[in-house]
Image (tube, rainbow, N blue to C red):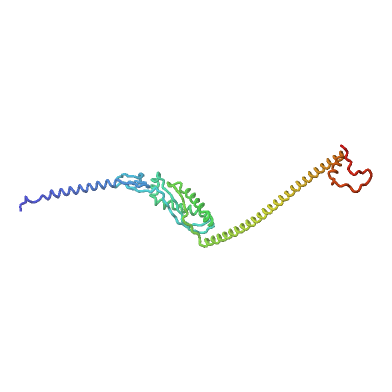
Amino acid sequence: MNDNNLPDLTASVGKKKGLIISVIAIVLAVFLVMSAMYTVDEGHVGIIKRFGEATEQVNPGLHTKIPFVDSVEMLEIRTRKNVEKLRAATHEQMPLTAEVSINWTVIRTEAFDLFKSYGGLTQFENRILDPKLRSATKDALARYKAEELIQNRSQVIARIEELLLDEMKAYPVKLDSAQIEDLVLPQKYIQSIETKQTEKNLAAAEKHRLERQKLEAQREVNTAMAQRDAAKAKADGKAYSIKIEAQAEAEAIKLKGLAEAEAMQKKAEAIKNNATLVEYMRAQQWNGQMPTTVMGSDQGILWNMKEK
């Protein structure tokens, strides 16, 4: 064969090698650019670590870092809830099991200090928050009797919050609220409480019945007194009416007697002063018959009617 017709393999291999190197360079460049960029989600802050050392804190958004040198740890600053289940005792040393929770939030401006001191949220919870929550809960529960824990749960919660706030005031977190999720007392005590409550309910029912009877009796007494007062008022009114009528009648009789007496007095005076009037009245009452018997002397048949 003629050597002049063979392809130039050296040139072909060189071109392919250059192309591969270019592709690798582009891939590396893209990788470097992508690894240099990162985002921090809302509700978090980013902690930049350079060769393992925390150097700065960044807020949510798009950021850049030095590839292979810097790394980013995300730290949540939204409200978190920790739940602890523990064994404790009441004021009278009665054992119980309690489940408590606390809502808390990392203070944004102090998140970097928390990370540097404790290495993250999980470590902070395990080493600081959870032990202090258990301690405050046990201390608060030991201040109350079992019955008070049931009746005054809100006071117990307030006491837990007060103790925990005092313990956590030196740390870069904000405590929101505590809750007693569950409180388990011995079964025998629960039964005794139920029995006692039943007895109290029966006593309350009996007291209510007696008070109701008392009210009904008082109502009857009030009704009787009202009827008595009404009858008395009616009798008093009738007596007063009779008295007034009697007084009026007596006054009328008195006035009538006085009038008649006055009339008779005037009449007597008139008769006394005028004899002719007497004769005139006798004449008016005469029936026109002549008397059949005349007694005494100087008795005329007719009356002695003088001219005047």
Which quarter of the rendered picture does the C terminus lie within? top right
Residue at the location (87% across, 39% down)?
A: 276
What percent of the width, then of the height, locates residue 44? 37, 47
Question: How many numbered dots are placed on residues in this image?
Answer: 0
User: Which residue is farthest left?
Assistant: 2
Is 226 situated above or below 255?
Answer: below
The front one of 254 and 19 is 254
Q: Is residue 127 left or right of residue 39?
A: right
What percent of the width, then of the height, locates residue 172? 42, 46
The front one of 123 and 192 is 192
Residue at the location (82% across, 42% down)?
A: 263
User: Which residue is farthest top?
Assistant: 308
What percent of the width, then of the height, locates residue 52? 34, 48
Q: Is residue 87 left or right of residue 115?
A: right
- Which quadrant of the figure has residue 275? top right
Residue at the location (18% across, 48% down)?
A: 19
Is 253 situated above or below 87?
Answer: above
What percent of the width, then of the height, locates residue 78? 40, 48
Q: Is residue 235 left or right of residue 204?
A: right
